[in-house]
Amino acid sequence: MSPAPHSQPSQRTRIKICGLTREQDVDTAVQAGADAVGFVLYPPSPRHVTAGRAAELAARLPPFVTPVLLFVNESAAAVAAACAAVPAAMLQFHGDESPEQCALAAAGRPWMRAARIPLDGAATFDLVEFAARHEQARAVLLDAHVEGYGGGGKAFDWSRLPPSVNAHLVLSGGLTPANVTDGIVQVRPRCRTLAVDVSSGVERAKGVKDPDKIHQFVAAVRAADALLARSTDALLSAT
């Protein structure tokens, strides 16, 4: 793996809006400035869409906005079929898949792996080891460990993350316009780069996004970027 991470505080935080099911929500996410949009291909989820529906929604995306297909313990054949429908997609594995299963299903496509971070302060999770085992992943997504799969709109304790993780991280789990600025400020110095992923935090109902909340979320992310940039400038001025 590459040397220890050195986060660049002046970077622009990438944003993924996940769990999209409607055309107007895809359009709003793009207009607000999202870098990626996520489609949940996990039937038990209230935000589930079929591969065909994901393809219809992804067809609305302009260049340089990435569709992401979320799978939970899916077969390699089903993953391949979904990727044929949405060929430009990045893959997100959110179940109990091993690194080898992820790589096999991805078949050379870019993918990221969800890490389920305990909500219980007494429980332990070795994120450094997890990231090392998934070194082929484009990123490790941090979500709260709740019953079932997905973060359940819960935020874990960001301060308990390791101080240095040699990976690109995606912060998820309970993010909202009210807390995402603090999450970025706390987590970005701990990794190579940081992105954020939101679903329930910008909804008015499950699978139905709120345009105002999407715009507020993006604005809060940009506020975090500006705050970190000012901190960096002040540090450089003092040296």
Image: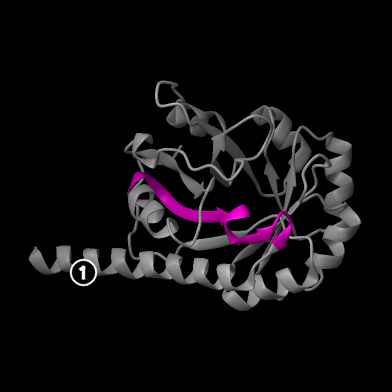
Residue 105 percent across, percent down from the top left: 78, 38
Q: In which quarter of the image is residue 80?
A: top right
Instruction: Find out whether residue 194 is within the magenta segment.
Output: yes
Please say whether residue 135 is visible from this viewpoint: no
Q: Residue furthest front?
A: 204
Closer to the camera in the image, 136 or 111: 111
Q: Which residue lies furthest to the left in this view?
A: 238
Amino acid beneath label 1: Asp
Residue name at image x 22 percent, y 64 percent:
231
Please say whether residue 85 is visible from this viewpoint: yes
Closer to the camera in the image, 79 or 124: 124
Residue name at image x 38 percent, y 69 percent:
223
Q: Give the range drawn in magenta.
A: 189-208
Q: Quadrant of residue 65?
A: bottom right
Q: How many marks?
A: 1
Instruction: Find out whether residue 130 is within the magenta segment.
Output: no
Residue 152 percent across, percent down from the top left: 62, 41
- Residue position marked by numbered label 1 in the rendering: 233
Say whether residue 130 is left or right of residue 52.
Answer: left
Residue 49 percent across, percent down from the top left: 83, 53
Residue 180 percent across, percent down from the top left: 44, 57
Q: Residues within 10 Å of mark 1 (few under 14, many from 20)?
A: few
Closer to the camera in the image, 195 or 22: 22
Say whether residue 179 is left or right of residue 53.
Answer: left
Q: Residue furthest bottom?
A: 31
Closer to the camera in the image, 39 or 93: 39
Residue name at image x 68 percent, y 28 percent:
96
